[in-house]
Amino acid sequence: MKLFGEVAALNQLVGEQREEIARLKGLKGRPTIKPSGMDKATEPPKPAKMQKRRFRGKVTPRVSIEDQVVKVAVPEGSRFKGHEPFLVQDLVISARATCYQRERWITPDGQAILAPLPEGIDGHFGPELRRFVLMQYHQGQSTLPRLAGLLRSVGVSISKRQLQRLLTDKQDSFVSEARDVLRAGLETSPFVSVDDTGARHAGKNGFCTQIGNDWFTWFGTRTSKSRLNFLDLLRAGHTDYVLNDAAYGYMRKHALPAALIASLAAQPETRFADQAAWLAHLGRLGFTELDVTPDPVRVATEGALWGSVQSHKFVCDAVVLSDDAGQFNVGQHALCWVHAERLVHKLDTFTDRHRAAQTRVRGLIWDFYADLKAYRAKPNQRRAVALRARFDRIFLRRTGFVTLDRLLKRLHANKAELLMVLDRPETPLHTNGSENDIRCYVTRRKVSAGTRSDVGRDCRDAFLGLAKTCDKLGIAVWDYLGSRLKVAGHIVVQPLDRYVRGRFRPA
């Protein structure tokens, strides 16, 4: 059996090498394995419709309807029987240039007075053009050359450099609003779902982390995907390091020696403004000179970051839901059932007996998952006790397939995180929401590769997150941009963090 496992590992390695060689040669790679479909398969059947709908619903335009009477020549003596409506929606795209002749005056005391520009005019391109550019680039996922070609074709005189400035210059307010949305979500949400994907920035590989739930989305691109990076992102823009009960508890949980914790607690300083001040403090206490495992500097820094997160009231009682990536295991952590079942689904089998054991276990997991979904809809303490006992029976069973038994034992070790829904029924059972959110980032990466400047990176992350948040809140991105850029006749959209806080404010 051990040889079977080694052969399977070698076959997997050879397959990955062949796939990489094919990619370098420009050939097609191996086909991707379809997901198990556990989540969709356990949905309750939808009631059958009495009659199949043949027509679309009534069209209700979002703009005012202009009536236009169409006349027709008729024979003399015909009788008028009214009008038959026929609704047509159309779009007018045209360029318009306005030269504002601003009055200049000189007061008797010699001061110059210049007439101000109308509201919304900030530069040589108007708010409607700026809104169109931001909408097409970030939500429409267009490329900069194609967008420049489109604008020129309708009569706008603009260069690629000017277009780039419209996308990145003077966007601090949007970046700040995205940060405020993250803070609101971390302060008020009962759970957050997290995920990450590869990112390219400044010619180097990095990682983009997604944080969100049903009401907000935020993206942050950094060079690392470590737990230090994730804890830094959870600070939502704050730079301080804090030593408090949460920080010391984190250090004890991650095996920092009690003597080192005591040396930190004995010092009067508990809050440090930035990383430089914190590392200088650790250097004075001798942490940087220690060469032991675990690294005391890393564990202490993670603890101070977690203390900062808690001091700002972020994720104090929220569940962090992830796909079992180690960097996300902080606070009250829950695991995705779809990713857990996928391990069983992708397990290599060698005999009919192995395949039968795998099929039997997958069936038990699917049935258990369906009952967890039913419990989430109607929580019950008695039912929770029964589900915990049933979990043990499934994941402590012996199938005779050694590799499968080891996997089940490993999954059983995550019992508390997989069954978090029993204590917190509002927590989803999967991270499908995060994977759906991060798809727009992957599309942007495929369309435009990476970013070069930090400003461009931050603007891309901010606008993608704000667009997703608007969609979740039921706000049209077009209206949101019009409100922020002060387009004439715009709809007033409040700061998005207010809507997020309103979703979770207790009654």
Image (spheres, rainbow, N blue to C red):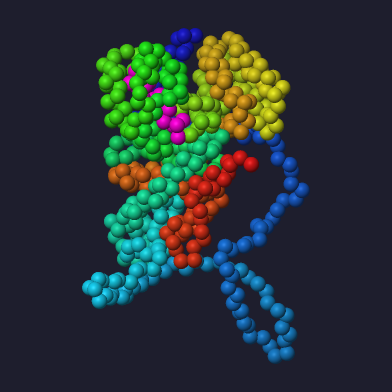
Q: Residue furthest bottom?
A: 76
Q: In this orientation, which residue lies closer to the viewer: 335 or 191?
A: 191
Residue at position x 59%, y 63% from top? 61
Q: Is residue 299 above or below residue 476?
A: above
Residue at position x 58%, y 73% from top? 66
- Helix, strand or loop: magenta stretch: helix
Q: In this orientation, which residue lies closer to the viewer: 121 or 128?
A: 121
* Image x and y of residue 168, in percent: 34, 51
Quadrant hosting residue 442: top left
Q: In this orientation, which residue lies closer to the viewer: 158 or 307?
A: 307
Could you tell me which quadrant the C terminus lies in? top right
Whether 80 is among the magenta residues is no
Magenta residue span: 296-312
- In this view of the protein, can residue 251 be seen by the observer? yes
Q: Is residue 78 above or below residue 399?
A: below
- In this view of the protein, can residue 33 be seen by the observer? no
* Image x and y of residue 125, in percent: 35, 64
Residue at position x 45%, y 51% from top? 139
* Image x and y of residue 333, in percent: 52, 26
